[in-house]
Each structure stands twice: as C-alpha cells, then as structure tokens.
Amino acid sequence: MTSILITGATLPDGTTGDLHVRDGRIAEAGGTIDRTIDAAGLTALPGLVDLHTHLREPGFEQSETVLTGSRAAAIGGFTAVFAMANTKPVSDTAGVVEQVQSLGAEHGYVTVRPIGAVTVGLGGTQLSEIGAMASSRAQVRVFSDDGICVSDPLLMRRALEYVKTFDGVIAQHPQEPRLTEGAQMNEGELSSELGLTGWPAVAEESIIARDVLLAQHVGARLHVCHVSTAGSVDVIRWAKARGIQVTAEVTPHHLLLTEQLVRGYDSRFKVNPPLRREDDVLALRAALADGTIDIVATDHAPHPLEAKECAWDEAANGMVGLESALSVVQAAVVDSGQLSFADVARVLSTKPAEIGRLAGYDAPFAVGSVANFTLYDPSVSRTFTVDQLHGRSVNSPYLERTLPGQVMATIHNGYATVLDGELVDIETVAAQVRHG
Amino acid sequence: MRHLLSTKDLSRDEAVAILDIAEDMADVATREVKKLPALRGKTVVNLFFEDSTRTRISFEAAAKRLSADVINFSAKGSSVSKGESLKDTAQTLAAIGADAVVIRHHASGAPNVLAQSGWIDAGIVNAGDGTHEHPTQALLDAFTIRRRLHGHGARGKALDGVRVTIVGDILHSRVARSNVWLLTTLGAEVHLVAPATLVPLGIDGWPVTIGYDLDQAIAAQPDVIMMLRIQSERMHAAFFPTAREYSRQWGLDDERLAKLPDGSLVMHPGPMNRGLEISANAADSPRSTVLEQVANGVSIRMAVLYLLLAGGVS
C-alpha cells in the first residue's frame, strides 16, 4: 500500500508537524515514501463523520446513489457517513443494510454505515428486525425513522429498551405530527405574512421532552436529530443536567441560515425542520459551543431538480450539505471564535463516531490509528457553485454564496480520495481499496 | 410596473396611482362602447389552478375592454392534472407568446416563483395564491371605499383616518392579508376581529389592532366593516365548535347591522354564506357594497393590466 508523508500540517491542537501514513495507518517517521503532500498552512482534522446522511440508494437513485453520495462526502472531508433508512425498500432488514454497506465498501470513497429503521417500512406501528440488523455484517448501531417521527410513545419506549441489548441508539426525528400537519416553514410572523402553514417550535420541543423522559425511564441512549429551536436546547440542557443519556445534533444550515430566506419562496431553502429565527440560530451556536449539542450532522438530503423547481408547497424538503458542511461550520462558529478547530474535530468526527459506535476515531492522529483525516485550508474563500457539488443533486442553499475554507485532501483508510482539492478518480480509489 | 404579486410591495403613491387609473377605466364602462385600444396585439393568459369563475371573468372582461387577446387556461382537466409542472406550463405559455399571465394558484408564493424563475418573461399578476395574497381584491376594496367616501372627487386621495374592521377567518384569508397591507399603506386604521384560533401567530408585528369581540368592535363605530367568508372545511378542523356558535359570536346579523353608524359600509369579497358570516339583510342593505365591489373589480384589473403592458405609474 502507498506510503504518504504530509509535511507541516497544523493539528487541531494548534501544533505543527509531519504526518506519516503507512499500510493504511498513522506511522512513525521513516521508511520509503511514495507521495509527499505539502500541508503548510493547512489544518489537519480527523476524518469527518456524518451521523445523518441520505444516500437514497436503493430506490431513489435519481437523487443520489451510494457512490455519488460517497463522492460528495469525500470532497467535503468526510471519511465515514451513516446512511439514513428511508430508502426503497426501507432499510429495515439485514439484507438491505448489508447491501448499502457493501456498496460503500466497494466504491471506497468513505466508510458507509447504514442506519436501520426503527419500525417496519417507517410505518410507525411495528418494530423492525433491529436485532437482525445489529448482528448482520453491517453491525447496525443507530436506528432511526428519520423523516418521520416515532410519535407513538409506547413504541418509542419499546425501541429505546430494545436497542439497549446491542448498545444501540435511537435517533429520533422530533416532530409532533398533529401539530405540523401541512407545515411549510417556521411558524411565526413571517409564516403568517407569507401565507405558509407554520411548523411550530413546540412540535419539536414537546417530542424531545417526552423522549428524554422515556430515555431516563428505561435507561437507554437517545439521539436527537437536527435540533432547530432555542426551546429544544433548553430541554436537552435540562436532560443532560439530570444525567439522562441524550445526545443531539445540529445541521450546518441551522447554524447559519434563518427563515428570512423563505421570503422569496425559493424552494432551495425548504427543509424539515424548517429554517428558524435569528434567536434560534444564536442559541444553537451557543449550545454547540458549550456541549449541550454534541455534534454537527449534515442531514444531506439530495433531490432532483423537478422536486424543487415548483411552487413552494409542492417542493420537497431538504438540501444537500456534505460538500459545504465544513465551510459552513467555519463561517457560523469558527470565524466568530465560538469553536476552535479542536472543537470542530470533536463535533464533526470523534463524537459522532462515538455516538454511532464507529471504531477507530477515538485517537485519530496517534501512531497505529487507521489513517482517516482531511487537510483543510481555512484561509481561502470561494464562491460556492454547482461545479463544487459532486453528488447527483444540486439542491444546495449556498449556491453563489461566498464560503470560507476548502478541503484540499481527504485520506480514507490510508489512501487519498481527494488530492489538491479534487476528487481522485474512481478507478484509482477502487485500485487502492483492492490493494489495501 | 413589472409584476403585481403583493400589496405589501406597493408604495402609497403607486397605490393611489393605480386607483386613479382605475377611475379612468371606470369611466370607460359608462360609455356606449366599453372598449379601449390600449392593449391591442397583447396576449393575456388567465392561468387558473383553482376554480374561481368570478375572478377569472373579471380579469377576462378587463383584458377584453383593453382590446387584449385573452386565453383562459384552467388547470383542471388539462395537462397540469396529468403531472405537468408549473415550470412546464410557464414555458408553454412563453412559447405561445403570452405578454401577461394572470395566475391563481393553491400554493402560496406560486406567482412569485413564476416571476422570479426566468421560465417566462411575461408580466405576472397574482389573482390569489394559497393563503398569501389577493392584491387586486384589496385594490378593488380600497377603490370601493374611496369612491363611497369621496364620490367623483376621489382622484388623488388616499384613505387617511378611515377605520376599517375586518371580521372572520384572518388566518386563511389572502384577502385579509392584502387588505391589511394596502389599507394601512393608504392611511386607514385597520382592526381585525376573529376567534383566537383564526388569528395568525406572530400577528403582533402587523400594523393593525386585534380583538375577539365583534360587538365591541361595532361599538367603536367603524367606517367600514368587511366580513370574510368562512370556508366549510374550517368548520370541521376545530377552529370553532359549530357554525351556529360562529354565527352568534362573529356573524353580522340584523341586530349588529342596526348598531353600525350611519354612512358606514358593509363589505364582503364574496361569495357570501348568507346566514353564517352575514345576514341576508346586511348583504342586501344600502350599506352593502358587494355588487359595487364586483363592478369595480373590472376597473381595477383594467388599470393593473394597463400598467403592466402599456406603461409604468407616472
């Protein structure tokens, strides 16, 4: 396998030094060198891990595939993604999750860890075969009906209890369905003005409140997906203070964008949960900084053009986010001084890996660790365009915006998937996977 | 004027100018030949994704009185119902050379999407979108109020100090929204009365006062009371217990009609639910402007189409 020397990289703790990669792992200095990467001025981050990605395959390959989503992830600095279960067929059996995992392994751009559905067909009435998925080759540890809330409190209790057997976690999409019927955007003054049905904050907060109490009651792990309101932060902070096993994620877009963008009815800004108010954005940033919110997760949600080029009410929810995540995090919380790159390493890599029970990310730059890292230049800025999107869909809210930073290289399992800011071609990656 | 999407975007001078041009257009209706050559050679498409015979006919009459060619396109039973998107439809209309598109759509913001998309270069007129706005309805309401108050001396005037009470389903009413923005831009004082379930959240930022008691609102002696239609589907969605209770609490019955001050106006955008939000006597009384509103609608729509296709406000 190729050996790589990375010179002059700045590690998350601020120290500068060389990194040696040999046989897929971080190595001591010495030995032959096949490739040298000059990383002067670049920040080395542990390989980013996204706990919340929609890869769409099987079933919605016109939006994304495991391959195209993996490419989008790699160019964004990710080395592992957790693929949500709302595929077709739903990832609710050992067969489907093994298929998703093996497609990821075959392509080699990132490690793909499937998420299993909590309920059969995301139907919300019967637990799926959680045990079979957990003991399959995919070793599923995260279970979620994301896109749909597990709203039945008894079923949620049972799911929380059941995954304890496998050290699993339920990742809940917190959305009280009755309070959000027909919801189109954040409920408030602007929704009233625009005539769009409101998605009230309390619909999220009430489910989180219920679920943390259930998690406490049964002693299980709960993960809250895409927290979007200041009130939700308050509930999670309260739960953590009581010692409840709850973790939470925020998306890059909820850290940067507000509901004011909806004013033009541009459906690129339609997402679930919706973009909220400035006060919510500030509360989310503060919660990420103080650890109330544990991680950033993209909720990368690709959709084809026709699902977005229509009236607002008819447009699909969701936006792609893998390629822009690190830049958006820098814009939202690093450049403001709220988070350091050491914090970024925690919220975008080590902690999501820990929540998802993904091995090999706890000591990323230690000698002997699997070499998964990214080299990032935080000093540049770029106009974000469709050319920088490498998935199958282009529904990004950042098109034509100026974003800071650029991923210059991504190393996955010791081989390069991105070099000089460009994706390594598929044949080269596949050859490296074979030779690994 | 490039498009008319909302009354919120209109300045006071623009709004007064539209009303003044509508006065000129209203004069045309009094002539033996009710027609002007202003839009000869222009094509106006009435693109209706929702049923609305009244509004469509009004726009059609307005365009024809200005000598435009009119194409009526009902989305029902068309290719739209077979899955054709707004984009496909817009590009089809662009290909046939539409100069203006009058669009009614069940989705809030659909006219904005059409205007900003680049799919079509025509002027866009919002003829009612979801629960967002219905700007020509508000303009015809303002026109009607101004004519009643100022008669033939209305030109150039706004509605300063006129007290307007709007009653009913504010939450779902595009007519209410457009009227709130336009009437207050023109200087009117707007008071909203509704059950709390039908008051939009976040309304505190609107330039209006809000109450829940219709009798109190009538006791405050408004110059205009505008009753909104209660849609039948609302009655089964827990917004209020029963039609009877709604009628008792928020209906303009004969007793409340009698308490209105002399000279006050009773307005309704139609179609009316007689006996629910408005009694037959109130609807047919001399105070009622319902039929004038319909007639004035043609004048307003002529003014808007003229401004879009034959020149700006000057």
Image (tube, coloured by chain):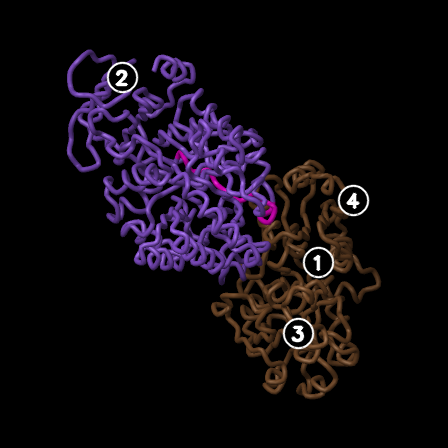
Chain colours: A purple, B brown
> Residue B226 — which label?
3
Q: Nearer the viewer, mark 2 or mark 4?
A: 2
Closer to us: A229 or B261: A229
Q: CA distance from mark 4 to mark 3?
A: 35 Å
Chain for disc number 1: B
Residue denoted by label 1:
B302
Looking at the rendered image, the quarter that the C terminus of chain B falls into is: bottom right
- Residue A227 to residue A410: above or below: below
| Label 3: chain letter | B
Q: Nearer the viewer, mark 1 or mark 3?
A: 3
Q: Disc 3 residue type?
A: Met
Q: Please give the range of residues in magenta.
A: A311-323
Q: Pointer 2: what residue?
A: A23
Q: Secondary structure at mark 3?
A: strand
Per the model, the C-alpha gap separating discs 2 and 4 is 65 Å
Q: CA distance from mark 1 to mark 2?
A: 77 Å
